[in-house]
Amino acid sequence: MERVATFAVLGDSAASGVGDTDKNGNSRGWSYYLAKNFKDPLVYVNFSRPGAKSDEILNDQLPKAILHSPSITAVIVGGNDALRNGFSPERLHQNLRSTIKQLKDLGSEVLLLQLHDPTLIVPMPKTLGTVLRRRINAVNQVTQAIAAEFGTEILRTRELEGIYERKVWHIDRMHPSKFGHQLLAQHFREILSKRWDIDPIHLDPIAKKPKAESIKWMLKNGTPWFLKRSVDLLPAALYLIICEHIRRLFRPNAHANAVIYFPEFVNHREAGLLEVFEERVS
């Protein structure tokens, strides 16, 4: 008798379905829509948790998933690593690499997700936006390096048509809306349909929420979240400002688009991930 396939999900809020809840307040998300459209019997287990970082995924979520010997595993990670003070691309690389290696050794097909650029849809101070963009880009560089090493599938979110349209995003503009989750499920289906029989993902009509409701949500949830993350990112933002002033002091004629050195990543150059830690900014 052929073994029933198992689809496991590891990750953070983007994997747990934040931005898409049913009438009872339960999160669903893209993996729910993908799983329920498999034509053959499927065991669906989701161990993701909002706020999870790569070390939790490696040390807590992964062992639980391994017990199920998953045929397919989605690993959505990096956003919370990037949003915390002390972000280390090297640590993220080590954690993600160990996670993916164990899954591949198990024979699981692995799905990864490129993070979108939140600075294109979330209003924020320029310096904070610069720090956040550099960190998110560093996460994506790490994810891409792991995908290339292990030959895993990666959904390139930034290349999706219309990905930054307002309808794709939740009120907080950091997580997909219900429509956005269904859109991600649709694209993950395209990746998996080469080897799995999956029905097309239905995109529900978009219900426009009253502006007053959006404002109320932002005041109650969005603003406190943003302030907390701003505090987490403040040390990095201050580092960036200081380094820019030093660069201009000692290199007053340097080109405006020169590489900004980011000291928070200095110890990780020896890891052979130089491209992760420098980025040209204007």
Image (cartoon, rainbow, N blue to C red):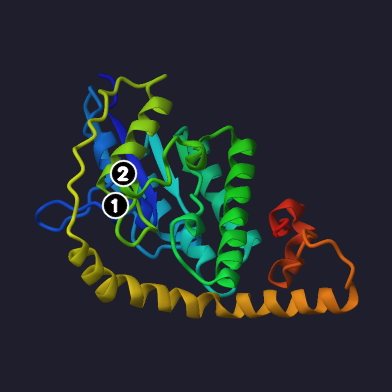
Going 58% across and 32% down the picture, which residue do you hit? 151
Callout 1: helix, strand or loop? loop
Mark 2 or 1 closer to N-term?
1
- Quick check: marks 2 and 1 in contact, CB under 8 Å? yes
Q: Which numbered disc covers residue 273?
A: none
Considering only vertical position in the picture, is 242 above or below 134?
A: below
Amino acid type shown at disc 2: His
Whole-percent x, y for residue 209 in the image: 18, 55
Q: Is residue 130 visible?
A: yes
Single out the mark in the foreground, 2 or 1. 2
Local packing at callout 1 (Cα closer than 10 Å; few below 14, some 14-19, many 20+) is many
Considering only vertical position in the picture, is 175 above or below 183?
A: below
Q: CA distance from mark 2 to mark 1?
A: 8 Å
Going 25% across and 19% down the picture, which residue do you hit? 1
Going 64% across and 38% down the picture, which residue do you hit? 149
Q: Circle 1 is placed at which residue position?
A: 17
Q: How many numbered dots are placed on residues in this image? A: 2
Q: Circle 2 is placed at which residue position?
A: 181
Going 39% across and 58% down the picture, which residue do you hit? 174
On the rendered structure, is 52 left or right of 97?
left
Local packing at callout 2 (Cα closer than 10 Å; few below 14, some 14-19, many 20+) is many
Whole-percent x, y for residue 207 in the image: 17, 47
Callout 2: helix, strand or loop? helix
Farthest residue, direction left: 24
Amino acid type shown at disc 1: Gly
Tell me where residue 163 sits by quadrant: top left
Q: Is residue 78 visible?
A: no
